[in-house]
Amino acid sequence: MKTTLKMLGLLAGLNIGLAPAMAFSPESDEPIKIMVADWTSMAINTDIVAQILGSYGYNVQKVVADDSARYPGFESGDLTIAVETWQTTQQTAFEKSVATGKVVDLGETGMHAKEEWWYPEYMKERCPGLPDWTALKKCAEAFSTADTAPKGRYLSGPVAWGGHDEERVAALGLPFEVVHAGTEAALFAELKSAYERKAPIMLWVYVPHWVPAVFKGEFVNFPKYEAACTTDAAWGVNKSATYDCGKPEGWIKKMGWAEGEKKWPCAYQIVRNFTMDNDTISKLVQEVDVNGRSIEDVSTEWLKANEPTWRKWAACAQ
């Protein structure tokens, strides 16, 4: 627990830009600690939910936490709510945490997650056979840099995102070195630079996100994920290793500290009702990451334009 707590930091000065609700008193004035991780869609969705709850008088704090280290914090109540938990990298840890009875599944957001190795379209000429993953065994050097040659270079996300890329490389016998970007911004800044120069690059891309709409490219087709891939070495193409498959894809869920639902039942109902879709959040992320607008301005603009929608989510507070 000490390790987890060191990763947490309160963000002061939460901006509530919505008109205050009338004639509603929150069930408790204790702080609802909403987790924020290090990618833009979660920051935007978190700010949207925080502003909604704040408009109804809830004491809301946004708390920064590493994605893969969140679970002890939720089980202890140090964290209250998270609006994005991705099946792609967190399914096993999430389900294990819910099984303790200390964490509650607050339902799907409506967004569909995919995270995988991605390359620009121009790399297909240099690596015939793509998007089939087996092509990478023959043309890894096409993705190499001075630091990795003759091995290919795979630019992964920040370490806190998880994803088991090192295990996948080893299990599938891929002649690649995994290099982790320090931040999401650094990850996609490197893509932009490489794309403009038609330089070799293979990196972690995910949706919902603006990248696939701006840059032409494809995801690598790895062996399809099944749960046994991560637990049974006998499964899959490598009979002596796990993670010889692609990442799962599917839901993005909301989660919460189970005891918190007793303390703030209406707030939890608002979070359960909250939904978002891929197209909408991708455009909001683009406004922040590409057009340079602030998260607070983008989320507040969405809230003002969609007030009838989120007021319905908050029917328990009307």
Image (spheres, helix red, strand yellow):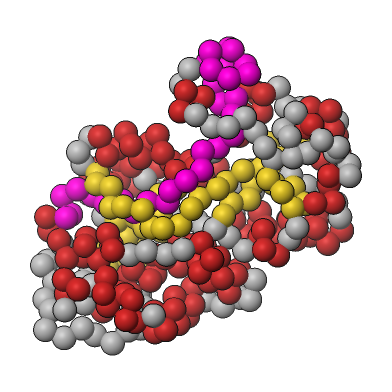
**Residue closer to the observer: 25 or 277:** 277
Q: Position of residue 198 (x, y in %)?
A: 86, 55
Hey, which quadrant is residue 209 in on the image? bottom right
Residue at 85%, 51% in the rendered image: 122
**Residue 171's x, y, as percent?**
63, 22
- Tell whether 259 sits left or right of 1: left
Can the viewer see residue 286 in this picture? yes
Residue beneath the point at 24% across and 85% down = 20
Quarter of the figure that contains the N terminus: top left
Would residue 214 appear left or right of 276 to someone viewing this image? right
**Horizontal and vertical percent for residue 206?**
59, 51
Q: Residue at x 27, y 39 (%)?
A: 98
Q: Is residue 245 above or below residue 122?
A: above
Q: Relative to 238, does residue 269 appear above or below in the rendering?
A: below
* Image location of residue 66, percent across then percent down: 44, 48
Nearest the camera: 61 or 207? Answer: 207
Which portion, as a residue range, is magenta? 233-261
Q: Is residue 281 magenta?
A: no
Report the predominant secondary structure element of the magenta stretch. loop
The answer to whether residue 9 of the structure is visible from this angle is no
Which quarter of the image is occupied by the C terminus? bottom left
Q: Is residue 6 rendered to the left or right of residue 20?
A: right
Q: Is residue 168 above or below residue 315?
A: above
Q: Nearer the viewer, residue 169 or 29?
A: 169
Q: Quadrant of residue 283?
A: bottom right
Q: Residue at x 80, y 55 (%)?
A: 194
User: Is 234 inside the magenta-drawn segment?
Assistant: yes
**Considering depth in this image, is 318 or 35 the residue closer to the camera?**
318
Instruction: Report the number of discs.
Output: 0
